[in-house]
Image: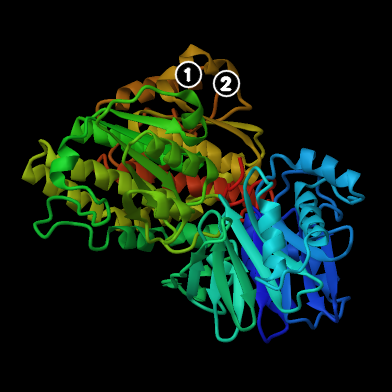
Amino acid sequence: MCGIVGYVGKQKAASIILEGLKRLEYRGYDSAGLCLLQGGQLDLAKKAGRVEVLVKEVARHRFIGTTGIGHTRWATHGGVTDANAHPHISSDGKFALIHNGVIENYAQIKTFLLTKGYTFKSETDTEVLCNLIAYHYAKEPDDGGASRLLECVRKALRHVDGTYGIAVLGVDFPDELVAARKASPLLLGVGDGEYIIASDASALISRTQNVVYLKDGELVHITAAGFTITTLDQADVSPVVDKITWTISDAELGSHANFMEKEIYEQPVALENTMRGRFSEDGSTANFGGLNLSAAELRQIDRFMFCACGSAWHACLVAEHLIERYARLPVEVDYASEFRYRNSPLDRNTLFFVMSQSGETIDTLAALREAKRKGYRVLAINNVVGSSIAREADGGVYQHVGPEIGVASTKAFTSQLLLGAMMALYVARLRDMSFNDGVQYVNALKGAPDLVRKTLLQAPHIKAIAERYSGYSDILFLGRLSLFPIALEGALKLKEISYIHAEGYPAAEMKHGPIALISEKCPSVFFVPKGEIFNKIVSSMQEIKARKGKIIAIVTEGCELPAGLADEVIPIPDCHEAVLPIVATVPVQLLSYYIALKLKCDVDKPRNLAKSVTVE
């Protein structure tokens, strides 16, 4: 999860690195640090706490060097302390290293290095790798060939088991930087006489939009004069320079109080961008140009398998409901973190989908690789062009919602819901959905952005409700069919940003155990749509009310609840079944958001969480 920034160029590196770290803080904010090569030595500043703490520490130093590295940490090995903060310096003082990932065999390497006289100041696996690089430097003579810094890093990494995105400096190598990746994102920004290595494009977009996405097993050697990319096996790699399509303004707050608020209100435009150009000319179906599957091949599919984590897993559950409902194909949804360990029996004609906003979620990437290893075609739904999942999938669909900075997913989640609904339409029209039903479905999807705009107008009403319910320690979210996953998502949002215990549950399952939790101290949020299950949901609400439980009802317009059944009512527009989960998501996003604000929580940087989970 950690944020990585490295700079080689003509400008003073400290301010550029600090700007990058501020933009990467959503990737980890336990501690932060930077190290510059200047005056023939490594100058270091690092502190536990957020980047703003590091900024104050840096102000006490005279950082003038033009080559450096910086890091913002999400702790894996070792507690949140100054000593465990990155960068780490080798015990001989010759190398500095920053790292995202987990070195799984660090204990064995550490034991070996202790016998060679190397010492350790931290509890981290990262310091072990830094000392391993120093060991190879001391051991290997200078053969006059490739950069010794590059070769020492390469040799050290050959002994490493685990995952890493790293950047390394050496005292004896002024104006040089080496970076490498394995299952942890890294990209190189190619600027005007300067180069920036980063774990996320947001750290370098203010300097350049030209980037090279490093692949697993690749190392980049950077100097002020240029860069070269090679593999662990010393094979040369021809770099491909891509262009980032969004700008720095897309990753800035503007007039909003925080990124979560900004991204909630960006949802109508994000949905429009997700749909743009993806409907047929006759308006009866969806079009996806990147699936790399013909209609005939898709008709041969007997089963879909979705793998994802967190909010994306909830979006997959909604896709399961819609695909089975409209395309009449069986769908299974699995946690990506469980899939590769379960050895699940799979039908031969199964099509895999993986879903990840960042395209770097390590468990989802591992599930993709396992499915491909077993010979299955894997398609991806993700938001980040050039991400690992996008590159390794056989095809897929980009969300096109722009950068999502808030840790708790909002606009990316509703975009995933939309793409799941569009996929259901696409497959259904290849099978037995009629032209007229397809047109009706498409029109409903096209209307989704305006329905979300209308729902956002409920914000002041929802804020007042949130403030009344911010004092509760437990809240239940209850829904049925396609709204059960939205109940799960609502509970997750509340847990993530307010730290209130919340659970999502199928409404009809309450009587099978969880109803024991109901009391005046445990309110429930119900999703109450029009249609065949309306009376069933009302019956579940009455069971809660009979036990003195308070009820917040999110109700589609046109539904009339029995008098006094709900303590609070949040109306949402009546809409097509494919759009309902998208519209119903907005009230629970706002409810969680305003409860968290009332409790003075940092909604953009919730404790213990990071935006992109790149370590197992």
Looking at the image, residue 287 sits to the left or right of residue 399; the answer is left
Residue 132, percent from left and from top: 78, 53
Looking at the image, residue 443 sits to the left or right of residue 355; the answer is left
Label 1 CA crowd tier, 10 Å (few <14, some 14–19, many 20+): some
Residue at x-position 59% and y-position 86%: 193
Q: Nearer the viewer, residue 470 or 291?
A: 291
Sequence-wise, the earlier of marks 1 and 2 is 1
Helix, strand or loop at label 2? It is: loop
Residue 364, percent from left and from top: 48, 42
Image position of 350 with respect to 439: above or below = above
Image position of 221 with respect to 194: above or below = above
Label 2 CA crowd tier, 10 Å (few <14, some 14–19, many 20+): many
Q: Amino acid at mark 2?
A: Ile
User: What numbered label is drawn on residue 381?
Assistant: none
Residue 34, percent from left and from top: 77, 68
Looking at the image, residue 602 sits to the left or right of residue 261; the answer is right
- Residue 255 shows in the view: no
Q: Which residue is mark 1?
A: 510
Q: Which residue is mark 2?
A: 518
Residue at x-position 80% and y-position 73%: 172
Name the quadrant containing residue 474.
top right
Helix, strand or loop at label 1? It is: helix
The residues bearing labels 1 and 2 have C-alpha atoms spaced at a distance of: 10 Å
Quadrant placement of the C terminus: top right
Residue at x-position 66% and y-position 78%: 8
Name the quadrant containing residue 514.
top right
Q: Amino acid at mark 1?
A: Met
Residue at x-position 50% and y-position 59%: 404
In the image, farthest residue toward the top: 512
Query: Is there CB contact under 8 Å for labels 1 and 2?
Result: yes
Q: Nearer the viewer, residue 321 or 565?
A: 321
